[in-house]
Image: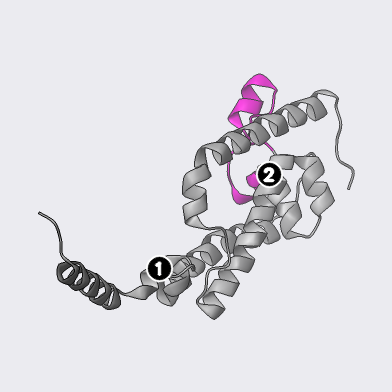
């Protein structure tokens, strides 16, 4: 069945009328979260609570001179892996590094445990983004859409950084290097 000029014109009018009824905000180049201030403020408050709490605990603690065991100031036991095998576990030094970051001692944080320092830097960035989001109702951080597409690459990079930092920590501790700051 062939469409005549009149039928084709009627279809075009109906389609254009239907498009006018569509909420155009769906086609906005801004991410959805940026258009939802309440959601952004809730997520921002969560970021502030979690990462601000982490940095707050880091401010409360004093970094261990040996580069690990800072967490024992919280009443936690020493690292079981280190106690049993004499080798630091993959997360040994993270609390000390985050504590250094919280005290503004960024070079010492990197020297103590590079991956732990990265966690501390991410916490600082999350607190800044959380404050911005809470105050403005807009999200300024990474797009969740982008993170959704690249999560495998990000996970591989994070695991590689953790393994390399662990190797660094084992090497530094096996050489008998003790921080003197």
Q: Is residue 70 magenta?
A: no
Which image quadrant: the N terminus? bottom left
**Residue drawn at (46%, 48%) of the image:** 148
Q: Position of residue 46 (x, y in %)?
A: 48, 64
Q: Measure the alpha-carbon separation of dots 1 and 2.
A: 40 Å
Which residue is most to the right? 180
**Residue drawn at (15%, 65%) of the image:** 4
In this rendering, position of residue 28 left or right of residue 169: left
**Residue drawn at (24%, 77%) of the image:** 17
The residue beneath circle 1 is 27
In this rendering, position of residue 18 left or right of residue 61: left
The first of marks 1 and 2 along the sequence is 1
Q: Position of residue 135 (x, y in %)?
A: 55, 79
Which residue is most to the left? 1
Pointer 1 and pointer 2: residues touching (CB < 8 Å)?
no
**Mark 1 or 2: the one toward you:** 1
- Confirm whether residue 64 shows in the render: yes
**Residue drawn at (63%, 57%) of the image:** 123
In this rendering, position of residue 89 left or right of residue 114: left
Q: Position of residue 169 (x, y in %)?
A: 75, 31
The relative height of residue 50 versus residue 44 in the rendered view (above or below) is above
Q: Secondary structure at mark 2?
A: helix
Quadrant for residue 83, please give it.
top right
- The crowding category of the residue bearing disc 2, from other C-alpha atoms within 10 Å (few below 14, some 14 to 19, many at least 20), is many
- The crowding category of the residue bearing disc 1, from other C-alpha atoms within 10 Å (few below 14, some 14 to 19, many at least 20), is few
Q: Which residues are magenta?
A: 71-92
Q: Foreground residue, 167 or 78? A: 167
Q: Foreground residue, 23 or 16? A: 16
Number of the label disc, if any, that sits on residue 116: 2
Q: Is residue 74 magenta?
A: yes
């Amino acid at each position: 069945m062939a469409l005549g000029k009149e039928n084709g014109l009627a279809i075009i009018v109906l389609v254009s009328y239907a498009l006018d009824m569509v909420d155009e905000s769906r086609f906005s180049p801004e991410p959805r979260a940026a258009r939802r201030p309440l959601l952004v403020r809730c997520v921002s408050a969560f970021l502030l609570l979690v990462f601000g709490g982490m940095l707050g605990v880091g401010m409360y603690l004093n970094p261990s001179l040996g580069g690990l065991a800072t967490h024992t100031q919280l009443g936690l036991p020493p690292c079981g892996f280190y106690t049993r095998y004499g080798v630091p576990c993959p997360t040994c030094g993270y609390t000390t590094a985050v504590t250094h970051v919280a005290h503004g001692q960024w070079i010492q944080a990197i020297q103590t445990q590079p991956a732990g320092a990265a966690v501390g830097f991410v916490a600082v960035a999350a607190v800044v983004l959380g404050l911005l989001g809470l105050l403005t109702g807009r999200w300024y951080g990474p797009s969740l859409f982008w993170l959704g597409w690249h999560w495998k690459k990000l996970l591989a990079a994070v695991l590689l950084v953790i393994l390399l930092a662990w190797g660094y920590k084992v090497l530094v501790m096996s050489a008998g290097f003790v921080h003197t700051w």
